[in-house]
Image: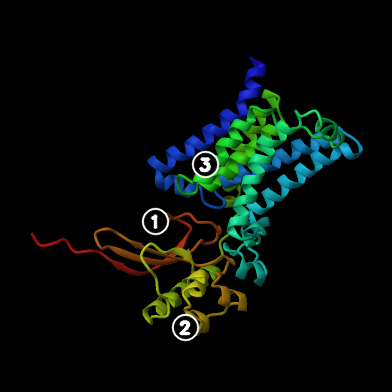
């Protein structure tokens, strides 16, 4: 029974995570939307899965000598890099502004390298990791010609049944059957690396408990450390009022369904007039905050343009607020996000 649990625990958990993602997206879209956001439970679960996987691979390296440590060290380094990239190396935690290079060339305006890479290349790299580590590696080490090389570099492949979990994860990533599927794929991949290093059922269950605890406790801990900043709150209110003025003056244009960082709207739509409007000319901001439309916490301002089938339309500009993460949904602005409604038009019922 123990061996069977050890073999199928990994793929079963990965499948359950992905299935829960699809179910939540279909039945509870607002809750699914919130937990899938940056710095939410899913992202922190991903971070802790990769961190604990790194610990496991360091443990593998520590049990070997010479070249035999290469595999464990390489996998540990990979997991740490992924965890760091996942939280933008602490950008949102500490509220620092990345350099102008990242603000201009990173599609998420974050301090991460993977989002500066062309989209197709990034997606191919993720697929290569999923199928290379999860499927090809456990098959290759079974080949007699590859076994001596694997032993020389201390390769401990993931259990072959775990390939089922990696292939399912790859399938979800390629088909992207629901919104934010990529966030859950990252979690599934982190769990895959965790299961690939630790195979004892008891240890794995403790690791899973650690991932679950970290996903729940970390956002709560960070919220508890948050401090009030009246000056910053006053600045963001002034910024939003200035952006409202720019929209009234026709410097900012939006289209139905738009939900994007303000900087990308300005650059992609060629709204050069925004560089001379109220936001650009009033208020005390750094040059980077003005150029890249950043709030007082060095996070991008966003624009959302919702249009209903009945003709209802609502346009908002908003900041993630002091906690530097999105709490709102398309339906409501939740604490601690700060928003300015620049247009709210409700369709009148037709005359009978």
Residue 280 drawn above or below residue 142:
below
The residue pinned by badge 3 equals 172
At 57% from the left and 51% from the top, the residue drawn is 39
Q: How many marks?
A: 3
**Residue 63: x and y, percent?**
86, 32
Element on which disc 1 rests? loop
Q: Residues within 10 Å of mark 1 (few under 14, many from 20)?
A: few
Q: Residues within 10 Å of mark 2 (few under 14, many from 20)?
A: some
Disc 2 from disc 3: Cα separation: 42 Å
The outermost residue toward the front is 145
Residue 246 drawn above or below residue 295:
below
Label at residue 131:
none
The residue pinned by badge 1 equals 330
Cβ atoms under marks 3 and 1 closer than 8 Å: no
Marked residue nearer the N-terminal end (1 or 2): 2
At 48% from the left and 35% from the top, the residue drawn is 19
Element on which disc 2 rests? helix
**Residue 177: x and y, percent?**
46, 44
| Of marks 3 and 1, the one in the foreground | 3
Disc 1 from disc 2: Cα separation: 28 Å
For the N terminus, the quadrant is: top right
Label at residue 273:
2
Disc 3 from disc 1: Cα separation: 25 Å
Marked residue nearer the N-terminal end (3 or 1): 3
Would residue 153 appear left or right of 350 to someone viewing this image?
Answer: right
Would residue 75 appear left or right of 287 to someone viewing this image?
Answer: right
Element on which disc 3 rests? helix
Q: Image quarter for residue 142?
A: top right
**Residue 141: x and y, percent?**
76, 31
Q: Image quarter for residue 218?
A: top right
Front-lying residue, 131 or 8: 131
At 38% from the left and 40% from the top, the residue drawn is 27
């Amino acid at each position: 029974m123990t061996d069977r649990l050890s073999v199928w625990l990994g793929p079963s958990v990965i499948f359950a995570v992905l299935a829960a993602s699809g179910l939540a997206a279909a039945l509870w879209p607002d809750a699914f939307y919130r937990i899938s956001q940056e710095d939410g439970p899913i992202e922190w679960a991903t971070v802790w899965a990769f961190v604990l996987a790194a610990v496991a691979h360091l443990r593998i390296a520590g049990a070997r000598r010479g070249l035999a440590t290469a595999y464990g060290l390489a996998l540990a380094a990979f997991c740490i890099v992924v965890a760091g990239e996942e939280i933008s190396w602490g950008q949102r935690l500490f509220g620092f502004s990345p350099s102008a290079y990242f603000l201009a060339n990173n599609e998420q305006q974050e301090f991460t390298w993977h989002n500066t890479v062309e989209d197709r290349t990034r997606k191919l790299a993720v697929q290569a990791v999923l199928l290379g580590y999860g499927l090809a590696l456990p098959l290759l080490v079974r080949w007699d010609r590859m076994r001596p090389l694997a032993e020389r570099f201390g390769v401990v492949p993931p259990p072959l049944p775990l390939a089922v979990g990696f292939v399912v994860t790859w399938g979800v990533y390629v088909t992207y059957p629901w919104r934010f599927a990529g966030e859950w794929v990252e979690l599934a991949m982190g769990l895959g690396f965790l299961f690939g290093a630790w195979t004892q059922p008891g240890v794995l269950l403790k690791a899973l408990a650690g991932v679950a605890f970290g996903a729940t406790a970390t956002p709560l801990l960070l919220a508890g450390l948050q401090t009030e900043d009246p000056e910053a709150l006053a600045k963001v209110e002034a910024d939003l009022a200035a952006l409202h003025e720019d929209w009234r003056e026709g410097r900012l244009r939006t289209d139905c369904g738009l939900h994007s960082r303000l900087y990308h709207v300005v650059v992609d739509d060629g709204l050069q007039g925004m560089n001379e409007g109220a936001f650009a000319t009033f208020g005390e901001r750094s040059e980077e905050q003005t150029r890249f439309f950043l709030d007082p916490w060095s996070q991008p301002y966003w624009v959302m343009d919702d249009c209903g089938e009945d003709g209802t339309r609502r346009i908002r500009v908003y900041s993630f607020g002091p906690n530097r993460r999105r709490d709102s949904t398309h339906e409501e602005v939740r604490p601690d996000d700060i928003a300015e409604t620049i247009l709210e038009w409700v369709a009148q019922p037709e005359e009978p």
